[in-house]
């Protein structure tokens, strides 16, 4: 039992649990599942700057901020009470490719060689963490949602604009990971 | 008791679809929020702060799953975009399947919320933003290895440098809001 909880959970356990978030939020209070909106609410709360897009009653959406705070706390619990003692398993083909860029550290869920405070001040670290983050925020809001709002909530309610958005997320990601990221990693 | 009365009163309003007195401010607010239909709060009810604790608990459960299934891992995202592992496709596919069935059941049996409100799912309207924004988000997703949910879980899991990525994502959201009128939609 204990090792089942600390080992990485398989997709057929995790996926359905994530899917259940959709009815959970709907039935707990008529809330549509979505995460990227939290960043809009943070803008509305902190720096609305009279921009119409951020001038609304964000306090009504405070549940969304509480929800993402919960996700953060969940992260803390997962690495303390349910910590996986082993190195992360990664596809051999990916390991071989990453070795070319000096990425050999598999001690954490993220590659410490590029995702760490030290790496933040390297060219590739800066691009990945800061420029990448910028486009996550800009792109999700431009698309009107992220993987949760479009791919999971949108597809669950059979909305075709969400299917378009999901396909574009995947297309952008596939092109970037295969053709642009190798260049960034080699910097 | 006061809360219960208020709930009952509002339930009658929403439940029977009678006219609800909406102020001009509320209409404006709704228009603004409808600009993007993701994640609008469809509930007409007002609750005390502690009602939000339930969303905290759902968030905690969700965060634990994110970390334990390694969805927040940069490596898993790279494997997905390079077709080197089925894991992420399995996660997203089975999540959507469970979501579709759940939403179908809610609609089929007209299941109401725990406060008795009718469940409303806002229709998403197509605009070019879903294409352009989607591609740009895909770019960011592939290089950071994280979509917005994992950003929060990653910080909790100890990758504290992701605070910088989250702040940058918030800045990206703000810049979108600033240039929104000039962008093709």
Image (cartoon, grey):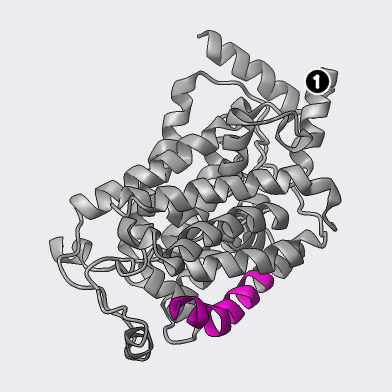
Tell whether position A172 is magenta: yes
Q: Quadrant of residue B127?
A: bottom right
Q: Quadrant of the C terminus of chain B?
A: bottom right
What residue does disc 1 label?
A: B25
Give the image location of residue B14, x and y in percent: 73, 28
Question: Residue at coordinates 38% horizontally, 39% vertically from top-left?
Answer: B57
**Taken as a whole, is the magenta stretch helix, strand or loop?**
helix
Question: Residue at coordinates 68% horizontally, 20% vertically from top-left?
Answer: B10
**Along the horizontal axis of the image, is B66 left or right of A184?**
left
Q: Quadrant of residue A57?
A: top right
Q: Secondary structure at mark 1?
A: helix
Q: Quadrant of residue A166?
A: bottom right
**Along the horizontal axis of the image, is A5 left or right of B140?**
left
Residue A104 vs residue A82, the one in the foreground: A104
Would residue A34 be visible to someone looking at this image? no
**Along the horizontal axis of the image, is B141 left or right of B54?**
right
Question: Residue at coordinates 67% horizontally, 31% vertically from top-left?
Answer: A48
What is the crowding at mark 1: few (fewer than 14 residues within 10 Å), some, or many (at least 20)?
few
Q: Tell me: residue B135, above or below residue B129.
A: below
Query: How many numbered circles are shown?
Result: 1
Give the image location of residue B70, x and y in percent: 35, 66
Q: Tell me: residue A94, above or below residue B37.
A: below
Tell whether position B77 is magenta: no
Q: Tell me: residue B123, above or below residue A113.
A: above
Would residue A176 be visible to someone looking at this image? yes
Mark 1, chain letter?
B
Give the image location of residue A124, x and y in percent: 45, 69
* Chain part drawn in magenta: A168-187
Give the image location of residue A66, x and y in percent: 46, 35
Q: Tell me: residue B92, above or below residue B44.
A: below
């Amino acid at each position: 039992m204990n090792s089942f909880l600390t080992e990485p959970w398989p997709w057929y356990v995790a996926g359905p649990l994530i899917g259940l978030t959709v009815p959970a939020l709907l039935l707990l209070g008529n809330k549509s599942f979505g995460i990227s909106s939290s960043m809009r609410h943070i803008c509305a709360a902190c720096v609305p700057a009279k921009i119409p897009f951020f001038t609304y009653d964000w306090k009504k959406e405070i549940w969304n901020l509480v929800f993402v705070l919960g996700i953060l706390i969940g992260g803390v619990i997962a690495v303390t009470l349910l910590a996986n003692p082993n190195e992360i398993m990664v596809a051999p083909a990916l390991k071989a490719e990453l070795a070319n860029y000096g990425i050999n550290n598999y001690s954490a869920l993220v590659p410490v060689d590029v995702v760490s405070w030290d790496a933040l001040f390297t060219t590739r670290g800066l691009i990945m963490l800061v420029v990448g983050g910028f486009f996550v925020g800009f792109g999700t809001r431009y698309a009107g949602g992220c993987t949760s709002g479009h791919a999971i909530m949108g597809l669950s309610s059979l909305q075709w604009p969400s299917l378009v958005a999901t396909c574009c997320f995947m297309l952008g990601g596939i092109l970037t990971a295969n053709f642009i990221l190798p260049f960034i990693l080699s910097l | 008791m006061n809360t219960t009365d208020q709930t009952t009163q509002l339930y009658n309003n929403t439940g029977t679809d009678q006219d609800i007195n909406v102020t001009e401010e509320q209409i404006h607010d709704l228009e603004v929020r409808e600009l993007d239909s993701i994640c609008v709060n469809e509930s007409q009810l007002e609750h005390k702060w502690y009602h939000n604790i339930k969303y905290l608990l759902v968030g905690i459960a969700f965060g634990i799953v994110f970390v334990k299934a390694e969805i927040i891992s940069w490596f898993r995202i790279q494997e997905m975009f390079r077709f080197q592992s089925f894991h992420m496709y399995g996660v997203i596919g089975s999540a959507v399947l469970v979501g579709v069935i759940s939403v179908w059941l809610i609609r089929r049996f007209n299941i109401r919320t725990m406060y008795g409100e009718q469940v409303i799912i806002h229709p998403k309207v197509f605009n070019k933003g879903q294409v352009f924004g989607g591609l740009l988000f895909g770019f960011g997703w592939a290089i950071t290895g994280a979509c917005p949910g994992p950003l929060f879980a990653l910080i909790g899991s100890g990758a504290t440098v992701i605070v910088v990525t989250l702040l940058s994502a918030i800045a990206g959201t703000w810049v979108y809001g600033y240039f929104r009128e000039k962008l093709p939609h």
